[in-house]
Image: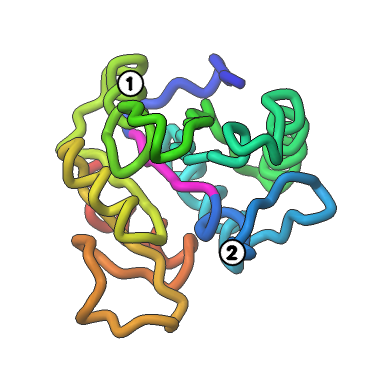
Amino acid sequence: MINSNAIRSHFVLLDRDGVINVDPGDYTTTIDKWEWAPGALEGIKKLYDAGFGILIITNQACIAKGLQTEEGLAVLHDFMLKTIRRSGGDIIRIYHCPHQTSDRCDCRKPEPGMILRAAGDYGFNLAETFFIGDTPRDMEAAWRAGTRSIIINAGDDNPDDLPGEFIAFDLLDAAEIVIEETDL
């Protein structure tokens, strides 16, 4: 799932569940279960229009648990990408970890493996790159990889208790922070 025409000089990394789509608490495995998170499409378009290459970094243990297949995930991601492109944004690539915590892989967040692989693939400076997530696990992965971090908090948690360099209400809010904080 690489869009080679969209190579950019600045990058931003996005978690999927809870940032791009609403995290229902179990797994989003089919298109009919997909619900766009508020501000997601607008935030992706804003980042894309500002010149950022956008990569997704997502844990998908539903595969290891037998609730989803690689093929089913590809169908879901194809739907997501087509909708994003129709809305004027783009995603260059999706990195996903199909493992469970018990597999002890180096790619499942909070391990930084997917982030480090993306940096190796695209040659971006980790210290100048934002990772936007919605969980402490995402923020730990960002910290371990050496990226800047924004945690999405739609008002559910006390902001003083949240990790992350910045706190944003949704992806559109996070996009504005990234643009303001990045020397383009």
Q: Which mark is residue 59?
A: none
Q: Which mark is residue 25?
A: 2
x then y, percent, for residue 24: 64, 64
Residue at horizontal 74%, vertical 38%?
A: 76
x then y, percent, for residue 130: 29, 46
x then y, percent, for residue 183: 21, 44
x then y, percent, for residue 142: 25, 45
Membership of 15 in magenta stretch: yes
Q: Mark 2 against mark 1, which lies toward the viewer?
A: 2
Question: CA separation, marks 2 and 1?
Answer: 27 Å
Residue at horizontal 80%, vertical 47%?
A: 31
Q: Residues within 10 Å of mark 2 (few under 14, many from 20)?
A: few
Q: Residue furthest right?
A: 32
Membership of 23 in magenta stretch: no
Q: Main secondary structure of the magenta part?
A: strand
Residue at horizontal 41%, vertical 37%?
A: 52
**For this view, does 133 lie left or right of residue 71?**
left
Q: Is residue 156 above or below residue 151?
A: below
**For this view, does 3 lie left or right of residue 108?**
right
Q: Which mark is residue 117?
A: 1
* Amino acid bearing label 1: Arg
Q: Secondary structure at mark 2?
A: loop
Q: Specify start and end residues of the magenta stretch as a single range.
A: 11-16
* Amino acid bearing label 2: Gly
Q: Nearer the viewer, residue 181 or 110?
A: 110
Quadrant of residue 23 in the image? bottom right
